[in-house]
Structure formats: structure tokens, C-alpha cells
Amino acid sequence: MGRITVRRSVTRLSLGKPPSRKADFLAAEEPLEIRVGGQQLAITMRTPGNDFELAAGFLVSEGVIARGDQFRSAMYCAGADGTADGLNTYNVLDVLLSADTPQPDPDLARNFYTTSSCGLCGKASIDAVELTSSYEVASDPVTLDAGLLVTFPDKLREQQAVFEKTGGLHAAALFDAATGRLLVLREDVGRHNAVDKVVGWAVQNDRLPLTGTVLQVSGRSSFELVQKAKMAGIPILAAVSAPSSLAAELAEAGGMTLIGFLRGESMVIYSRPDRILPTEEVKA
């Protein structure tokens, strides 16, 4: 669809120099309405692309599905532009679940735009995640060499093609903890959307639960990112910045390894440090 970036004329100004006009590229941001069986479930602001993955990952994070075979199909809805022309704007997506999968609770529907967070907060939300998650990450026996882990931020950055062009996208990447191999990377204006796209990739490739993996994200780790990782069975979440207090609390309660300030050759481990094996050198 060619809608990941938008070309725009801008004015560049530097002290001591005259203003100059130039063309620049911005990361696209458009609403995506997610429907299940024709019923609206959520509207999120996202970067167009990998929308089926985004919807599938969102359904996992909300506890609607836990297996790939529960996500039967998805299709864009024509006539979604609200005009008589009936154009397909590719901004409304309808998901069909398997016959044995219950439809989402109507109370789950969010008739508003979701941006950087989903509105979950507090102890009640932590209990809710514990009750609805289909996977137990605390028992995952995965370990990870610290010398391998410190290479992940650079590997993520090297693969951020759209960020390189716009400077305006978050990224989430999934790595194999044993080998350090990059499994998938997704970019989006919302880091939570990038994570949903990664989880959706796992849904479509029948990879759930994501045992033995590491989720590396740009920016910080919020409560919602820990929630999404746990719902997908990811045992280790790493970020280049600090987590929020609630993110650390949820990670500890769920037995997830949470890492922040992963920069250069150092890191801070907030929960389950036993999974990270000390080393004296970087491993390519």
C-alpha cells in the first residue's frame, strides 16, 4: 500500500544559517479499527503494515486467543471510508475466530483510540494478567549469555529500515535466546503495536508459546509491554531504557526476566537475574 511513510515539505533552521526548505519523510500514523465477527473491539493508532499480525497479537494480549488455529482469517472491510464511493481505506479489519473460540466479552470493547497505553493499571490489573494468561513463563528454563544479550540492541537498530528513513518509529524484535538469531522485527509509531505485530507473527506461524526467546524493544518497558510479552509466553524482555515501577512489579510477579538500560556492555536486571549468565566478553 505504500503508506508506511509520508513525504512532506519542511523548513530546516540552524542558528547562524538562513532557513531552507526541503523534503522530509514522516512515519505514517492512521487509525485501525479491529472487529471480531463484525463487532468493533478496538481502535488503535498505528503505522500501516502487518495489520493482520497486529490484530492477532492484540487478541493474544487481551486473552481472546492463545493459539494460532484460533485465528481463522482476517479481511479489510470495503466501504470503510464512510462515503458513498465505498472505498476500502484499509483501516478497518474484521477477524474471524475458530468455531470453538468464544467471542470477546462485549465489555472488552474499547470505543476510543489507544495510543501509548491500554488503560490497565494497579494491582487488579496484575491479578487479571495472572488469571488470563495461558502460559507460565516462570517455569521456562531458558538462560542467556550476557555477552550475547548486549549485541541485541545493535542488531535491532541495524534492521530498522523505516526508522532510518524517518527517525520516528519504535521497534520490537524477537531473538532466539540460545543462538542470538533474530527471528522477526517489526516497527510502528506505537511500541505496543510493534510488540503486537511480533506476537501476531508468532500466531500466524504457530509459534506460541514463545518459550526460549527474548523480546528486545526500543525505548522503555511499560506495564503493557510486560503484559503482552507474558501473554505470549516470552520469558525475557529487554529494553534500552528504564522500566516503569508497575512493569517491574508485573515481571517479578509473573517470573519474567526484565532488563533495562541495555547499552554498550552493561545492563540493569529488575527480576529473575538467574537467567542471565555473566561473561567477560561480547559474543558476536
Image (cartoon, rainbow, N blue to C red):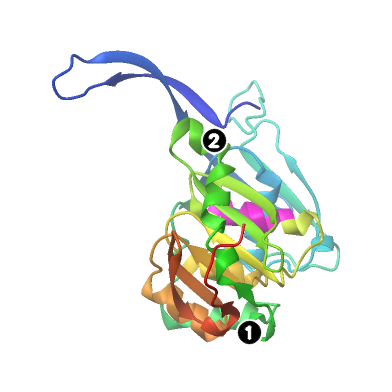
In 3D space, how far apart are the residues under numbered discs 1 and 2 (Cα atoms)? 35 Å
Q: Residue at x 67, y 72 (%)?
A: 233
Q: Residue at coordinates 49% horizontally, 49% vertically from top-left?
A: 190
Instruction: Tell me which amino acid carries mark 1.
Output: Ala
- Marking on residue 162: 2
Residue for point 28% across, 21% down: 12
In front: 2, or 176?
176
Q: Dot 1: few (<14), some (14–19), or many (≥20) neighbours within 10 Å?
A: some
Instruction: Name the residue beneath numbered marker 1.
Output: 138
Task: Please identify the quarter of the rendering in which residue 281 is found.
Answer: bottom right
Q: Going by the picture, which residue comes out furthest to the left?
A: 16
Asked where in the image residue 268 lies, by quadrant, the reply is bottom left
Which numbered disc, 1 or 2, marks the residue that appears first in the sequence? 1
Q: In x, y percent, where is residue 59?
A: 66, 61
Residue farthest to the front, as pictured: 280
Magenta residues span: 193-201
Q: Nearer the viewer, residue 251 or 71?
A: 251
Q: Nearer the viewer, residue 152 or 186?
A: 152
